[in-house]
Amino acid sequence: MAQSIVFYEKPGCLGNLAQQKLLLGYGFDLLVRNLLETSWDAETLRSFFTQKNIREWFNTSAPSISSGTIRLSGIDEKTALQMMIREPILIRRPLLQYGDCRQAGFEAGDVFDALGLTPDGVQDLDGCQMPAAFESCGEVP
């Protein structure tokens, strides 16, 4: 039996729903987890961001980032992880795990490589799919 993809989502996120639909359409099994209710520790969370710079760890649609309350310039790794553990809406999503492979974002990365996926046709699913009527992902239940 093939391993399932662990898919950490924000419930109600339209982008995450589209991403899940695409993966299911390719025949993959998903174990969907609530990113916001998962108890994260710095080491585990850090393992999803292996090849990204710190700014790319963040969900730039999060209310405190899009409003300018949090500025990402100059944030170090320890501070970034502490912020995301305290406020999980800041974490870029989805977080994906397949076996020992982990990645943040729905794009080329370790999990996509392990699954044999290419970014063609999925790049437009990495960004926020929220209709313009909402200002940020924080407004969706």
Image (cartoon, grey):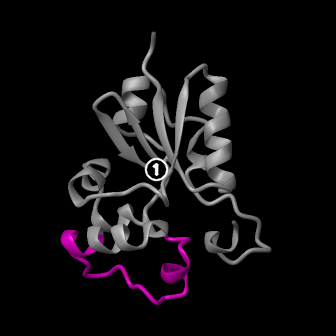
Is 82 part of what is drawn in magenta?
A: no
Q: Which residue is found at the position 56% from the left and 45% from the top?
A: 123
Give above or below for 139 relative to 29. Answer: below
Relative image position of residue 20 (x, y in whole percent): 62, 38
Q: Which residue is found at the position 53% from the left and 73% from the top?
A: 62
Badge 1 amino acid: Gly
Q: In the rendered image, which quarter is residue 113 located in?
A: top left
State whether the magenta stretch is mostly helix, strand or loop: loop
**Quadrant including the N terminus:** top left
Relative image position of residue 82 (x, y in whole percent): 28, 72
Q: Is residue 103 left or right of residue 68?
A: left
Furthest-bottom residue in this view:
69
Q: Which residue is found at the position 26% from the left and 78% from the top?
A: 75
Furthest-right residue in this view:
133
Relative image position of residue 96 (x, y in whole percent): 43, 41
Q: Is residue 137 left or right of residue 100?
A: right
**Quadrant including the C terminus:** bottom right
Secondary structure of residue under mark 1: loop
Residue tagged 1 = 105
Is 69 part of what is drawn in magenta?
A: yes
Mark 1 is surrounded, within 10 Å at the Cα level, by few (under 14), some (14 to 19) or many (20 or more) other residues, namely many
Q: Is residue 47 left or right of residue 13?
A: left
Relative image position of residue 57 (x, y in whole percent): 36, 62
Q: In front: 67, or 83? A: 83
Furthest-top residue in this view:
1
Give above or below for 101 relative to 106. Answer: above
Q: Which residue is found at the position 24% from the left and 60% from the top?
A: 42
Q: In the rendered image, which quarter is residue 26 located in?
A: top right
Give above or below for 129 relative to 2. Answer: below
Give above or below for 94 relative to 63. Answer: above
Q: In this picture, which residue range is highlighted in magenta?
A: 60-80
Number of callouts: 1
